[in-house]
Image (cartoon, helix red, strand yellow):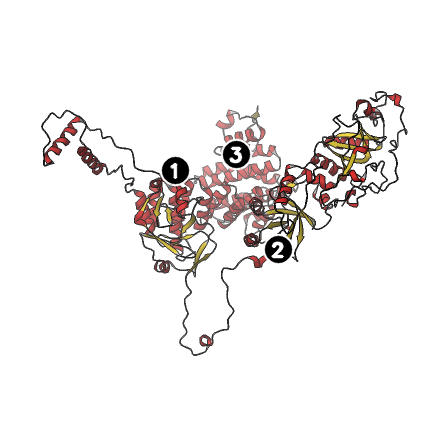
Amino acid sequence: MTDAPLLDRAASCYLRVGQVAEAARCYREAGYFARSADLFARIGRYRDAATDYAAAGLIHIAAWVLVHNLNDPTAARASLAPDPGDPADLVDPGGQIDPADLAGLADPVESAVGSMFDALERRLVSARCDVADRLPYRRILPVLADVQAMLAEASAAGRSAAEPAWPANAASRRIEEWAVALAEAAHRYDQVALVFAAAVRGVRPGAEQRWAEWSARVLHTELTLPSAARQTPAATSAEPATSPSVR
Amino acid sequence: MTVPPHRSGSGAGRRSPLFRLDEIPPDEVPVSPAAGSGGRPFVPAPTPPATLPAPQNEPASRPSSSGSDGSAEPDGSDRAGPAPVVGLAGSFGSASAALVFAGSLVATGHGDGFRFLRVHRPGPAAAGTGDGSGAWWVAVEMALDLGRELVSTAHGRLYVHTDGRFQPDRGWGLPPAAAAGDAAGEAVPTSGFGSASVVEVVRAAGLHPVVAGTPTEAVVLLPGALAGGVVQRALELGLSVRYRPVRLDPLVDTPQSVIPQSATMQSATTRSDTTAGPFGGGRVATELRLSAASAEPLPASLLVALNHDPFVLLCRATGDRLLVQHAMASALPDPLLAGLVDADTWVLADGSFGCWRLVGLGEPMDAAALVRLVDGYRLEAPERTITAPGDTSLRLAGRPVAIVAGRTSGVDIDAALLDDDDLASIPPLLAGHPLAEIAVVVRGRDRHLLLAPGGLLERLPVGEPLYCLGPGPLFLPVGYRTRPRLPPTARRALFGVADDIAVVALPARAVAFDLHAREPVWTLWAGPGPELDLQLPPEAVAALADVDTQVTPRPPEPGPVSAPEPSASGWQRARELLKRVRNRAPEAPSAPRTWLDDALEAEFADNFVRAAELHERNGDPLRAAHLYERAARRNGARISP
């Protein structure tokens, strides 16, 4: 057993000189698996990253790295072994998530929202495994529809509850990122646009910029959003409030 | 596998040849220098003598009035169906091109009917006409359109056999007329050709570099003294290794003047000549066969390392007949080359190793026994005095502490042990290097210790790299550990380590260094500084002169003090004064005490955290990280690695 605080300081020093691999090794030896996994993923050592994400209890992220970065859907599915009581089991694949179904699992609203995020992450990983296994793409559309609904609405609910927004924002940001990657892997760029549009309607921080960057990177076009969409966000309408023009 | 016809010495395939070269007198046929021909003269094809018939779907003889340029003939593109099968020959400027053409013949199902030719006796029409008499020729019977495509692909020139001559082909349409090339003087009579063996062509073409694949099996030829290390590394990687001694005889015994050789094969021939001795130029080497379990590819890193070793030849094996150097290839595919081997095993490599004929000396054996054990353990009967019940005098005798080879992967380089030659190499190595700022050297009688606060953290190309085992400045060579494993207190007691005495434990001995004698490493190449011209104001000079006057027993001669330059004694005093004020002595290149000294002393006192904090505060986070790690491991496990 080594001295974790000293290894933490060693890792910080390694990061200052740019030796990310050494820093990740120190974090791993110190037991700070989430940090080491992030660093391993940053330098492309995805297998190590998946191992450490799993060790840190971030099963969904580990599975996502396995399937998305390592193209190993078998290992990803194995790491997503169903466990009893998983809220995802309550969700009909292809059906909408009803928060009322999750209300009885935990009393705090925060737990319910977190469980909803977990369920969405799990379904996204499973859908990404389907894409990797070249299964019919129609199975991913319900997942993306749920993600779009969450991105367009959940943010407003969170603000109204006056709760700390950053955990939900971090989770929703990851879900948005995975949904975009999933749709891109399936070559469904229309779904990518719908995901971004939902994020813009939901006033997700930086959603417009991410959409524009994605458009420039993938479509090689500049994205222009109507100003009305930015000034009157959400509009709490499921219909696409933004009709982006690509020039 | 298709084998070219030269092995049977006939050159005849299953099909009846459309032409033959039996006009060549046997005594003038060049003798193949390679074993493929066995030194035998060319034997004409045992087919009935026949002149080359006209193409099968063409008239036996075309009217000469059709014109030598064939302008009156219909173009071949207007005809339907396959092109006529004719006897043709490609002339190529190099043996490699001829081999490429031969390979394409094999690939298209014509591997049993071609033969290599050289212009042996230029005919009257061939002399001085640029007919390619120095080129390599490949003769075959095949469809004309396919022959045109393959020959042009190999950058050759196509000739069609007509009436005992090779007429140049115009590249389209019907075969050239009998007199087409004669008018231009480009026709080559077949009587001027001699047969060349495939071995000659392979030998002249040599090898060229190719992208190395990922073989599942490899053969290593190396001196026996190097076998143990390779076997150990291969076993560590989980490979299966078998070995046997082999005899290598030169594949080419005598150079043949009639055959131009490529540079590669010339050097191989030279090598065989120079190594020729009482045993016929052969030598004995060790063959290792490396194979991975379950048909997995061999580790690429191992293959690269072996391929870079100048004393080792790494080969890929094609069956039991052919070994070709790794990442090299002949223009002829390996399976076809393997079919040319007459006996034993051929080893084809570039000029640095040469080409050899390999003869195995015994059956392959498991190579695990080649890994030399450090110690021998005698088999002894148990001592009854120890195992006897009721014996109260049981006492375990301690084994002498030894420094043995062991895994130290992941350790950082903390210091280096230098000898006198290494010390002389340090100035050009470290001048301008960041280590010159912090490294110190402790000189000894014939060994010297180069170290730095926080560790060198870099493997220098000189000296033996050391890692600090601790406690204190106890260093071991990288790749070695103590046996038995010792706790820190035992190491301090057994090795006599103190805060100011560094000990380097070597397998054969331990050397100690007085750390008080350490000097900055830059003192190895930096001598005294420049002479200091002290620029004092005239008033200070006058005051110093007054002091001189007062402290000197004999006052100087009275006179005006007009010279602004101080006296020699004034210089000395001013210098001493400045030295005291600024703590600098320009004539002695000793550095003042800095935080590095504090960090080094804290490190040797095992106060790694303080040393790390000093490095971190002074902008050296890399060594701070290294020291934090050492502190963490020291706190976590207080036993030797």
Query: Quick check: marks 1 and 2 in contact, CB under 8 Å?
Result: no
Vertical side of B467 occupied by A155: above or below:
above
Q: In the rendering, at what x and y percent does residue A115 appear?
A: 51, 46
Residue beneath disc 1? B431
Question: Which residue sits at x=11%, y=25%?
Answer: B560
Q: Nearer the viewer, residue B372 or B255?
A: B255
> What type is the residue that disc 1 sits on?
Ala
- Whichever of callouts 1 and 2 sits on the residue coming sooner in the sequence is 2
Q: Nearer the viewer, residue B51 or A169?
A: B51
Is B203 displayed left or right of B624 in the figure?
A: right
> What type is the residue that disc 3 sits on?
Ala
What's the CA distance linking mark 2 and mark 3? 66 Å
Q: Furthest residue to the bottom?
A: B390
Dot in front, 2 or 3: 2
> What type is the residue that disc 2 sits on?
Tyr
Q: In the rendering, at what x and y percent does residue B20 appear?
A: 84, 37
What's the CA distance linking mark 1 and mark 3? 58 Å
What's the CA distance linking mark 1 and mark 2? 47 Å
**Image-quadrant location for residue B438:** top left
Instruction: Tell me the subunit letter for badge 2.
Output: B
**Disc sitting over residue B276 in the figure:** none
Dot in front, 1 or 3: 1
Instruction: Tell me the subunit letter for badge 3.
Output: A
Residue beneath disc 2? B243
Is B53 displayed left or right of A226 in the figure?
A: right
Tag 2, which secondary structure? Answer: strand
Residue beneath disc 3? A199
Q: In the rendering, at what x and y percent does residue B558 appear?
A: 9, 28
Tag 1, which secondary structure? Answer: loop
Query: Quick check: marks 2 and 3 in contact, CB under 8 Å?
Result: no
